[in-house]
Image (cartoon, rainbow, N blue to C red):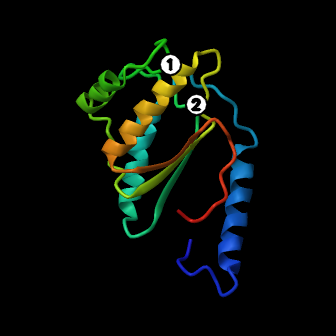
């Protein structure tokens, strides 16, 4: 998207409409098929994409329950999450993404069928992860709607 929003914001509005249309087109036939969830792998990939455009403002919006579930780190199976242990595993396996300067919004985080302490453990782990990665965690919410966009 161009840096210039247009005199009356028309370029910015057109870009937003285009992204929404593209999102609806691409997601119309999506169906869940994966047996596991590799959020850390997706974050490492995102960090590489952000590194290609370092001069732009970087915002990452994640719609997920944030229940990482791979052989490297399983946050879905335990009843409670040991934040320090999970962070140590992440760093030991080289899965800490470089997200310096990225603003992160995480929406749709749920702990369906779990106790509240499980959700709180997820929140603490991801807050610590993003802090170590250099990112700014702006939202970590069970809600699925983006807050009023203020460009930050």
Secondary element under disc 2, as helix, strand or loop, is loop
Inspect this view and state whether residue 37 appears: no
User: Looking at the image, which residue is at 47% across and 34% down?
Assistant: 39
Q: Nearer the viewer, residue 74 or 38?
A: 74
For the residue pair 44 and 116, the one nearer the viewer reads as 116
Q: Which residue is mark 2?
A: 65
Q: Residue furthest bottom?
A: 7
Q: Secondary structure at mark 1?
A: loop
Q: Quadrant of residue 54?
A: bottom left
Task: Please tell me which residue is depicted at 70% across the width and 37% down the height of the picture.
Answer: 30
The reply to whether residue 118 is visible in this rendering is: yes
Q: Which quadrant of the structure image shows residue 114?
A: top right
How far across and how far down the image is residue 37, in percent?
Answer: 51, 27
Pick the residue in front: 28 or 87: 87
> What x and y, as percent, mark residue 40?
41, 35
Give the residue number, with chain letter if any, for mark 1: 76
Q: How many marks?
A: 2
Numbered circle sitting on residue 133: none
Residue 107 pos. (x, y %):
60, 41
User: Is 54 rendered above or below residue 5?
Assistant: above
The residue lying toward the viewer, choosing from 1 and 134, is 134
Please provide percent x and percent y for residue 116. Answer: 57, 21
Q: Quadrant of the N terminus?
A: bottom right
Crowding at dot 1, Cα within 10 Å, few <14 / some 14-19 / many 20+, comes out as some
Instruction: Give the spatial CA distance, label 2 vs label 1.
Output: 10 Å
Q: Residue at x 49, y 13 (%)?
A: 77
Q: Residues within 10 Å of mark 2 (few under 14, many from 20)?
A: many
């Amino acid at each position: 998207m161009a840096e210039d929003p247009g005199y009356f914001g028309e370029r910015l509005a057109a870009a937003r409409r285009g992204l929404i249309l593209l999102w609806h087109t691409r997601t119309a036939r999506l169906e869940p098929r994966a047996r596991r969830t590799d959020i850390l792998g997706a974050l490492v990939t995102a960090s590489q994409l952000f590194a290609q455009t370092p001069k732009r403002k970087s915002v990452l919006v994640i719609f997920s329950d944030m229940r990482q579930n791979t052989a490297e780190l399983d946050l879905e199976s335990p009843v409670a999450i040991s934040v320090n242990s999970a962070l140590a595993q992440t760093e030991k396996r080289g899965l800490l993404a470089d997200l310096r300067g990225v603003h992160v919004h995480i929406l749709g985080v749920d702990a369906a069928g779990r106790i509240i302490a499980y959700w709180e453990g997820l929140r603490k782990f991801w807050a610590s992860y993003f802090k170590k990665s250099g990112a700014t965690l702006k939202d970590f919410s069970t809600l699925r709607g983006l807050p009023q966009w203020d460009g930050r």
